[in-house]
Amino acid sequence: MEILRVDDPFTGEIACEVPMDSGETALSAVERCAAAQRTWADSTVADRAALVLRFADAFVADKDRVALEITRMMGKPLAQARAEVDTLADRARTLAALAPEALSETALPEKRRFLRSVAREPVGVVLDIAPWNYPLLTAVNVVAGAVLAGNGVLVKHSSRTPLCGPQFERAFRLAGAPERLVTSLTLGHEDTRALLSRREIGYVAFTGSVAGGLEVQAAAAGRFIGVGLELGGKDAAYVAEDADLADAAEQLADGAFYNAGQSCCGVKRIFVHERHFSAFTDSLVALARGYLLGPPEAPATTLGPLALPGAPQELVAQVEASRRAGARVLCGGGAAVAGGRGRFLPPTVVVDEEGATPVMREESFGPVVALAPVASDASAIERINDCRFGLTASIWTADPARAKEIGRRLAVGTVYMNRCDYLDPMLPWLGIKDSGRGLSLSRWGLQELTRAKSYHFRLRGPGGEGET
């Protein structure tokens, strides 16, 4: 039996050992999940919502254990891991509250002698291929929504965080879910690819790299099923002339460096009105230098180690290539340790006024942010859109009308004003361009995990004839 071993990014010791599931085990799991789903499809939305609420409670009751496992697998500071459990529960509860209306049958306007409506039906089994960076939050968007929509779920979690899939399976079991309705699998790429050919799979959701998304899309291309892809980002911010500079600097530092910058919607590019560029840059650098690298289980630590073994070297190479191309590195930029341990990159701030260096053009999955001055709103719009990604953008201004007009011209899935790096479960979460396709969360995300069915009934008249 093949064993998956995961190292602790801080200590370097083995954090967990997990047996890999075989292809035969995976196929059996699909069949058992599908059998559970067929019964679950007949449940009421009220019963599904009640199950998801109990699932959220079960997760929160197990918060300390779950958070510690996450911290040891991928290096997230323990306080942030605990907060992730709480946010999972909030999203699950929000989706449960939205489900009755979102999934109800919609009656069309009355027409004499006809009954017309549109129902939302389950797609079957949903395969969720989840990532390691926010291992609970990225998964709950799909898993909770799929269960509420009447589907079964197979959770194939990242090889960096293999204990998180079983956390979902356990919480649903404790909540009283039908056996195998939510099933965790630890699989390699080829066995995961093979699952997509199974007729029971009605939808696949993937969160990860652009290359991984293309692989999933290609693997599903032979079947007419839904595919949801949340991929990379190079999310931008624009600090306008009328922005509150102190608040913008504080919020954007958090948006750039939270979770060691390992976030698809983390802030990676900041364009600042030229009048305030110097003052804003000084504030951001001061905030960056205030982060404390250390053991992720220590309460004082505000920036944990990078999850993947090669990440510090890759980011340092990107920063150095940008420096050679003319960028100025104001702080950070070199690999570090804390007390002789861990794979860290300190918060790194780079100025690239021309926008041609790797830190401004390529994805930086770590605590690296690039800054540039702009002369106008129009220039900021052009610079933000000059990117192959389109997940989010934030506008920092005192004027909502200005933010709406700028946002209308931005090629992104979500536009923020005076906030960033945040998912509101009442709003759909989506990206365009190389940031993916499909959506999750909100009433629209729930409907994404269903298929529509039209009902068109002609009623017989007294004389046996209906009207056309």
Image (cartoon, rainbow, N blue to C red):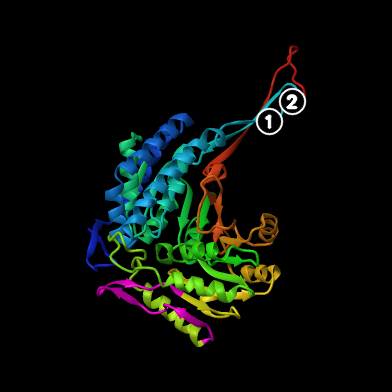
Q: Position of residue 204 (x, y in %)?
A: 47, 51
- Disc 2 marks which amino acid? Lys
Amino acid type of the residue tagged 1 in the rendering: Leu
In this rendering, is residue 35 above or below 77?
above
Q: Residue at x 61, y 61 (%)?
A: 395
Residue 345 belongs to magenta span: yes
Left or right of residue 335: residue 219: right
Q: Which residue is mark 2?
A: 111
Dot 2 and dot 1 residues touching (CB under 8 Å): yes
Residue 120 sits in which quadrant? top right
Q: Quadrant of the C terminus?
A: top right
Q: What's the mark number on residue 108?
A: 1
Toward the right, the furthest residue is 468
Crowdedness near tag 1: few (<14), some (14–19) or many (≥20) residues, C-alpha within 10 Å: few
Magenta residue check for 280: no
The range drawn in magenta is 325-348
Tag 2, which secondary structure? loop
From what the image shows, is residue 358 above or below residue 74?
below
Q: Residue at x 36, y 66 (%)?
A: 303
